Image: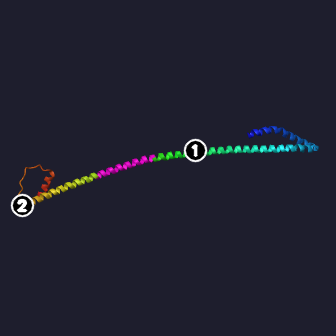
Protein backbone atom coordinates (compact mmCIF):
# COMPACT_ATOMS: atom_id res chain seq x y z
CA UNK A 1 0.00 0.00 0.00
CA UNK A 2 2.89 2.30 0.69
CA UNK A 3 4.10 1.78 -2.84
CA UNK A 4 0.67 2.75 -4.18
CA UNK A 5 0.83 5.99 -2.17
CA UNK A 6 4.32 6.52 -3.44
CA UNK A 7 3.36 6.18 -7.08
CA UNK A 8 0.26 8.36 -6.89
CA UNK A 9 1.96 11.45 -5.42
CA UNK A 10 4.97 10.94 -7.66
CA UNK A 11 2.78 11.20 -10.76
CA UNK A 12 1.15 14.34 -9.48
CA UNK A 13 4.41 15.91 -8.36
CA UNK A 14 6.38 15.08 -11.50
CA UNK A 15 4.81 17.97 -13.49
CA UNK A 16 5.40 20.27 -10.50
CA UNK A 17 9.08 19.38 -10.52
CA UNK A 18 9.31 20.13 -14.20
CA UNK A 19 7.64 23.50 -13.60
CA UNK A 20 9.98 24.24 -10.72
CA UNK A 21 12.98 23.28 -12.81
CA UNK A 22 11.70 25.50 -15.65
CA UNK A 23 11.26 28.37 -13.23
CA UNK A 24 14.80 27.90 -11.93
CA UNK A 25 16.17 27.93 -15.45
CA UNK A 26 14.10 31.00 -16.22
CA UNK A 27 15.29 32.64 -13.02
CA UNK A 28 18.89 32.06 -13.97
CA UNK A 29 18.31 33.67 -17.32
CA UNK A 30 16.58 36.74 -16.06
CA UNK A 31 17.76 38.36 -12.83
CA UNK A 32 14.56 40.40 -12.51
CA UNK A 33 12.44 37.37 -12.02
CA UNK A 34 14.44 36.07 -9.03
CA UNK A 35 11.98 37.45 -6.51
CA UNK A 36 9.04 35.86 -8.28
CA UNK A 37 10.92 32.57 -8.56
CA UNK A 38 11.74 32.63 -4.84
CA UNK A 39 8.09 33.12 -3.95
CA UNK A 40 7.12 30.21 -6.18
CA UNK A 41 9.91 28.13 -4.68
CA UNK A 42 8.59 28.70 -1.15
CA UNK A 43 5.39 26.88 -1.95
CA UNK A 44 7.44 24.43 -3.95
CA UNK A 45 9.83 24.07 -1.06
CA UNK A 46 7.10 22.87 1.26
CA UNK A 47 5.92 20.50 -1.43
CA UNK A 48 9.48 19.32 -1.95
CA UNK A 49 9.87 18.74 1.80
CA UNK A 50 6.71 16.65 1.83
CA UNK A 51 7.87 14.83 -1.28
CA UNK A 52 11.25 14.11 0.27
CA UNK A 53 9.54 12.97 3.47
CA UNK A 54 7.31 10.63 1.45
CA UNK A 55 10.30 9.37 -0.52
CA UNK A 56 12.26 8.82 2.67
CA UNK A 57 9.27 7.06 4.26
CA UNK A 58 8.89 4.89 1.17
CA UNK A 59 12.61 4.14 1.29
CA UNK A 60 12.30 3.14 4.95
CA UNK A 61 9.31 0.94 4.15
CA UNK A 62 11.19 -0.64 1.26
CA UNK A 63 14.23 -1.13 3.50
CA UNK A 64 12.02 -2.66 6.19
CA UNK A 65 10.39 -4.98 3.65
CA UNK A 66 13.79 -5.96 2.30
CA UNK A 67 15.08 -6.57 5.80
CA UNK A 68 11.97 -8.64 6.60
CA UNK A 69 12.53 -10.70 3.45
CA UNK A 70 16.19 -11.16 4.35
CA UNK A 71 15.27 -12.26 7.88
CA UNK A 72 12.63 -14.64 6.51
CA UNK A 73 15.19 -16.07 4.08
CA UNK A 74 17.75 -16.43 6.88
CA UNK A 75 15.12 -18.13 9.05
CA UNK A 76 14.26 -20.54 6.25
CA UNK A 77 17.96 -21.21 5.75
CA UNK A 78 18.44 -21.88 9.49
CA UNK A 79 15.38 -24.12 9.47
CA UNK A 80 16.69 -26.07 6.47
CA UNK A 81 20.11 -26.38 8.12
CA UNK A 82 18.45 -27.63 11.32
CA UNK A 83 16.40 -30.17 9.34
CA UNK A 84 19.53 -31.38 7.56
CA UNK A 85 21.43 -31.57 10.86
CA UNK A 86 18.59 -33.59 12.42
CA UNK A 87 18.49 -35.87 9.39
CA UNK A 88 22.26 -36.34 9.61
CA UNK A 89 21.99 -37.18 13.33
CA UNK A 90 19.20 -39.66 12.64
CA UNK A 91 21.26 -41.29 9.88
CA UNK A 92 24.27 -41.38 12.20
CA UNK A 93 22.17 -42.94 14.97
CA UNK A 94 20.83 -45.54 12.53
CA UNK A 95 24.36 -46.32 11.40
CA UNK A 96 25.51 -46.69 15.01
CA UNK A 97 22.52 -48.90 15.79
CA UNK A 98 23.31 -51.08 12.78
CA UNK A 99 26.94 -51.31 13.86
CA UNK A 100 25.91 -52.17 17.42
CA UNK A 101 23.52 -54.85 16.15
CA UNK A 102 26.23 -56.31 13.92
CA UNK A 103 28.70 -56.25 16.81
CA UNK A 104 26.16 -57.96 19.09
CA UNK A 105 25.52 -60.71 16.53
CA UNK A 106 29.28 -61.30 16.18
CA UNK A 107 29.67 -61.19 19.96
CA UNK A 108 26.86 -63.74 20.43
CA UNK A 109 28.47 -66.07 17.86
CA UNK A 110 31.85 -65.69 19.54
CA UNK A 111 30.36 -66.30 22.99
CA UNK A 112 28.44 -69.33 21.70
CA UNK A 113 31.67 -70.80 20.30
CA UNK A 114 33.46 -70.19 23.60
CA UNK A 115 30.60 -71.70 25.59
CA UNK A 116 30.47 -74.78 23.34
CA UNK A 117 34.23 -75.25 23.64
CA UNK A 118 34.01 -74.88 27.43
CA UNK A 119 31.12 -77.37 27.57
CA UNK A 120 33.15 -79.89 25.58
CA UNK A 121 36.09 -79.34 27.90
CA UNK A 122 33.90 -79.85 30.98
CA UNK A 123 32.30 -82.98 29.49
CA UNK A 124 35.74 -84.36 28.74
CA UNK A 125 36.87 -83.60 32.29
CA UNK A 126 33.70 -85.18 33.65
CA UNK A 127 34.22 -88.35 31.59
CA UNK A 128 37.84 -88.47 32.71
CA UNK A 129 36.85 -88.05 36.35
CA UNK A 130 34.14 -90.70 35.94
CA UNK A 131 36.66 -93.12 34.45
CA UNK A 132 39.04 -92.43 37.30
CA UNK A 133 36.31 -92.99 39.87
CA UNK A 134 35.27 -96.23 38.18
CA UNK A 135 38.88 -97.36 38.08
CA UNK A 136 39.32 -96.45 41.75
CA UNK A 137 36.09 -98.24 42.65
CA UNK A 138 37.22 -101.33 40.74
CA UNK A 139 40.63 -101.17 42.41
CA UNK A 140 39.00 -100.73 45.82
CA UNK A 141 36.71 -103.69 45.11
CA UNK A 142 39.68 -105.83 44.06
CA UNK A 143 41.56 -104.76 47.12
CA UNK A 144 38.58 -105.53 49.34
CA UNK A 145 38.13 -108.93 47.71
CA UNK A 146 41.78 -109.66 48.17
CA UNK A 147 41.66 -108.58 51.80
CA UNK A 148 38.47 -110.61 52.29
CA UNK A 149 40.17 -113.66 50.83
CA UNK A 150 43.20 -113.15 53.03
CA UNK A 151 41.03 -112.78 56.12
CA UNK A 152 39.10 -115.89 55.16
CA UNK A 153 42.32 -117.83 54.83
CA UNK A 154 43.70 -116.53 58.09
CA UNK A 155 40.45 -117.46 59.86
CA UNK A 156 40.62 -120.93 58.34
CA UNK A 157 44.21 -121.27 59.41
CA UNK A 158 43.34 -120.24 62.92
CA UNK A 159 40.32 -122.45 63.20
CA UNK A 160 41.85 -125.23 61.22
CA UNK A 161 38.61 -126.15 59.57
CA UNK A 162 37.70 -125.81 55.99
CA UNK A 163 34.32 -124.35 55.26
CA UNK A 164 31.82 -126.56 53.53
CA UNK A 165 31.78 -125.97 49.87
CA UNK A 166 28.48 -124.91 48.43
CA UNK A 167 27.35 -125.60 44.94
CA UNK A 168 29.85 -124.22 42.47
CA UNK A 169 28.95 -120.73 41.30
CA UNK A 170 30.02 -118.97 38.25
CA UNK A 171 32.56 -116.51 39.39
CA UNK A 172 33.25 -113.24 37.63
CA UNK A 173 36.60 -112.71 36.03
CA UNK A 174 37.86 -110.15 38.52
CA UNK A 175 37.20 -112.46 41.46
CA UNK A 176 39.11 -115.30 39.86
CA UNK A 177 42.00 -113.01 39.38
CA UNK A 178 41.71 -111.83 42.94
CA UNK A 179 41.76 -115.37 44.27
CA UNK A 180 44.60 -116.26 41.98
CA UNK A 181 46.61 -113.30 43.17
CA UNK A 182 45.69 -114.07 46.80
CA UNK A 183 46.87 -117.63 46.49
CA UNK A 184 50.04 -116.48 44.81
CA UNK A 185 51.01 -114.54 47.89
Residue at 27 percent across and 53 percent down: it is 128
Q: Earlier in the sequence, mark 1 or mark 2?
A: 1
Which span of residues is magenta-colored?
101-125
Quadrant in which the N terminus appears:
top right
Whole-percent x, y for residue 160 in the image: 5, 60
Where residue 25 appears, as percent x and y from the top left, is 89, 42
Q: Nearer the viewer, mark 1 or mark 2?
A: 1
Percent position of residue 15, x then y = 84, 38
Horizontal relation, residue 77 to residue 129: left or right: right
Q: CA distance from mark 1 to mark 2?
A: 109 Å
Viewer-proximal residue, 4 or 85?
4
**Residue holding disc 1:** 83
- Answer with the quarter of the image where residue 44 lies: top right
The residue under the point 28% across, 52% down is 126
- Find out whether residue 134 is within the magenta segment: no
- Residue bearing mark 2: 159
Q: Residue at x 84, y 39 (%)?
A: 16
Position of residue 64 in the picture relative to residue 79 (left or right): right
Q: Residue at x 31, y 52 (%)?
A: 122
Asked if one can make out residue 185 in the rendered structure from this viewpoint, the answer is: no
Give residue 35's quadrant in the image: top right
Q: Label 2 neighbourhood size at 10 Å, few (<14), some (14-19), many (20+)?
A: few
In this view, the residue in front, 163 or 47, is 47
- Density class for disc 1 (Cα within 10 Å; few <14, some 14-19, many ≥20) is few
Q: Secondary structure at mark 1?
A: helix
Q: Quadrant of the C terminus?
A: bottom left
Compared with residue 131, is residue 41 higher up or lower down, i.e. above or below? above
Outermost residue toward the bottom in this view: 158
Amino acid sequence: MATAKKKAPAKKKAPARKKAAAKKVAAKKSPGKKVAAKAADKGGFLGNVFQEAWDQLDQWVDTAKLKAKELAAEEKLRQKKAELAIKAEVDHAKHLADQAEKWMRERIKSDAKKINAYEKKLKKQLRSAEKKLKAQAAAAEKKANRKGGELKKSIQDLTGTAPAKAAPKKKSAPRKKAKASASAK
